[in-house]
Amino acid sequence: MDVVWIGSPNKDKGREALRPMAVVIHIMDGTLQGTDTWFGVGTAGAVHQYVAEGDTAWHAGRRYQPTWKLIKDTPNPNFYTIGVEHEGQVDTPWSDAMLGTSTHLVMEICNRWSIAIDRDHVIGHREIYARKTCPGTWIDLDGFVARVRRLALDPASYNLVDRSGSVQARLDLNLRAGAPTTLAPIARTVPGGSTLEYAGSTSNGLTVNGNAHWYRSSDGEFFWAGATTGPVPAT
């Protein structure tokens, strides 16, 4: 995905030792010219980035009658969320390009930070600050999350490289059917010490313990590289 770096001074350095645990969906009530969050998605599908993911943007620090069940008493949600803004007004229909790009961006963020793709972890700004309708009246967040899940389960979403070889499982290891994510069903489990043949690998699967590398078998089963003797596939 092409992301254009814009940069913004409206941030704090770092995250007070916290990690992102949710993605907050916003509507800009305006254009891509600037916003106080990490990412902005335009109606034509362009993506701008304003703040590095390891820093804290000022996008959702105020609370009012929050309905988000995972909200913390302290600190404010800016420190443990990532926000994605969308070009338009609260009642503007989202273009296919913006919806498709946002779906892909949110999937990538969730995979990078091991954020569950569900409605507890992909939320609207109004679930933190109820005085707003953000992200607007057009987008169905339940349907949006379902789109993100479908994309995460599509093997075409990942940068698969065809390269064969074998590794050993260092512990009992689940092989997932169809995609490099724990969203995919378990096809089978092999005991530690088993030799596993692979036909390819990807470096942008679900991140587990800081490692996003997964192997793919010739049968289309995926297994996490971090649990093998080859935690980073050979290049």
Image (tube, helix red, strand yellow):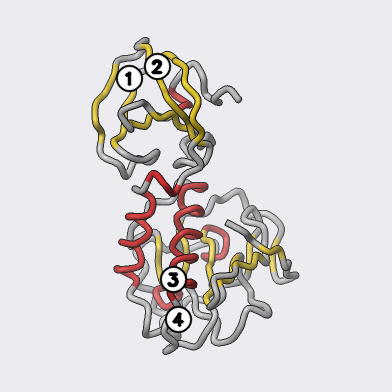
Crowd rating for badge 2 (residues with CA inside 10 Å; few <14, some 14–19, many 20+): many
Crowd rating for badge 3 (residues with CA inside 10 Å; few <14, some 14–19, many 20+): many
Return the x and y of residue 8 as percentages of the image width and height.
73, 70
Task: Return the residue at label 4.
Answer: 134
Return the x and y of residue 65 as percentages of the image width and height.
39, 79
Asked if labels 3 and 4 touch by Cβ distance under 8 angstroms, the answer is no
User: For numbered disc 2, what is the local secondary structure?
Assistant: loop
Crowd rating for badge 1 (residues with CA inside 10 Å; few <14, some 14–19, many 20+): some
Nearest to the eye among marks 2 and 3: give it.
3
Asked if labels 1 and 2 touch by Cβ distance under 8 angstroms, the answer is yes
- Under mark 4, the amino acid is Cys
Q: Quadrant of the N terminus?
A: bottom right
Whole-number angstrom distance, CA of label 2 to CA of label 3: 39 Å
- Under mark 3, the amino acid is Leu
Q: Is residue 195 above or below residue 72?
A: above
Task: Return the residue at label 2.
Answer: 169
Task: Return the residue at label 1.
Answer: 172
Whole-number angstrom distance, CA of label 2 to CA of label 4: 46 Å
Q: Which mark is residue 99?
A: 3
The tag earlier along the polypeptide, 4 or 1, is 4
The tag earlier along the polypeptide, 3 or 1, is 3
